[in-house]
Amino acid sequence: MHQLYEFVSGPLAWIAWTVFIVGSLTRVVVLVTSTIEKDPVVVNYFSLKHALRSMVIWSIPFFPRSSRLNPVMTVVSFTFHICVILVPLFALGHIVLWEEFFGISFWALPDRITDIMTLMVIFGLIFFIIRRFSLKEVKYVSSWSDYMLPLLILAPFVTGYAAFHGWFNPQLMLILHIFSGEVLLMAIPFTRLVHMVFAPFTRAYTASEFGAVRHAKDW
């Protein structure tokens, strides 16, 4: 068990980070170069002002019209995305790893807050899965990967919660937590999870087209 822990917390962690960083950078380069090649006019109408304005507006809950039309989805989605980003970055146990691996150190979330935010992530994922099964218009455009990705995200949060609270076999839960987190990290560049990397580019593209070309709002 100790050797397995040493492997997932050592060599496999470096592999996961390398795949994530190199894969994400490659996807961004391919996205930008292919867009310029296939749609060169995008360079001419790109507007930093409209891009930044759109990013700010879409960051405000219930400001865009579509978010007001789906209040429950808006609340769950905003809460989920805030928690799913902050917990991996600022959980106390992860702060130690940031310093050990990259030599950087910053403040950590209190354990109780981390606990609550972890439960919010788990609740959000369950909500998304049920929504995908229950709404016909969502189910119609869903593929098998849309059902697998929430489970992929769910795994490190459930095992991390179980390990922290000493449930089942805590050492095994910790190993599964680290392993599932690394699998998730490596999957980001190659699945629809890459939207977290592409989001600023797609938002800037859409906002520039609506603002600088159509002279219309994109929210």
Image (spheres, grey):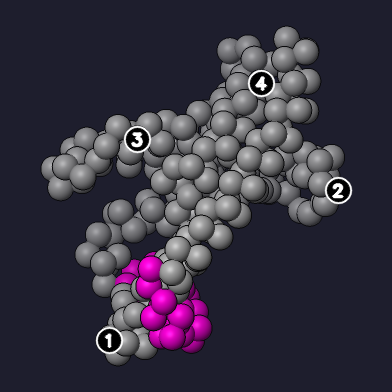
Task: Name the mark on residue 214.
Answer: 1
Identify the residue at image location x=52%, y=38%: 187
- Image: 92 above or below 38: above
Identify the residue at image location x=58%, y=12%: 168
To which residue does mark 2 refer?
103
Q: Amino acid at mark 1?
A: Arg
| Residue 40 falls left or right of residue 169 | left
- Front residue of 35 and 115: 35
Foreground mark, 2 or 3, reads: 3
Rendered image quadrant of residue 157? top right
Q: Amino acid at mark 2?
A: Gly
| Residue 107 falls left or right of residue 20 | right
Foreground mark, 4 or 1, reads: 1
- Are circles 2 and 4 on residues that touch, CB within 8 Å? no
> Sequence order check: which comes first, mark 1 or mark 3?
3
- Front residue of 154 and 68: 154
**How far apart are labels 4 and 1 at the CA level?**
52 Å
Identify the residue at image location x=16%, y=42%: 140
To which residue does mark 3 refer?
145
To which residue does mark 4 refer?
175
> Sequence order check: which comes first, mark 2 or mark 4?
2
Q: Is residue 60 magenta?
A: yes
Q: Quadrant of the N terminus?
A: top right
- Image: 95 above or below 53: above
Q: Which residues are magenta?
A: 38-64
**Dot 4 alpha-carbon crowd within 10 angstroms: few under 14, some 14 to 19, many 20 or more:** many
Identify the residue at image location x=48%, y=42%: 190
The x and y percentages for residue 53 are 45, 81
**How far apart are labels 2 and 3 at the CA level?**
36 Å
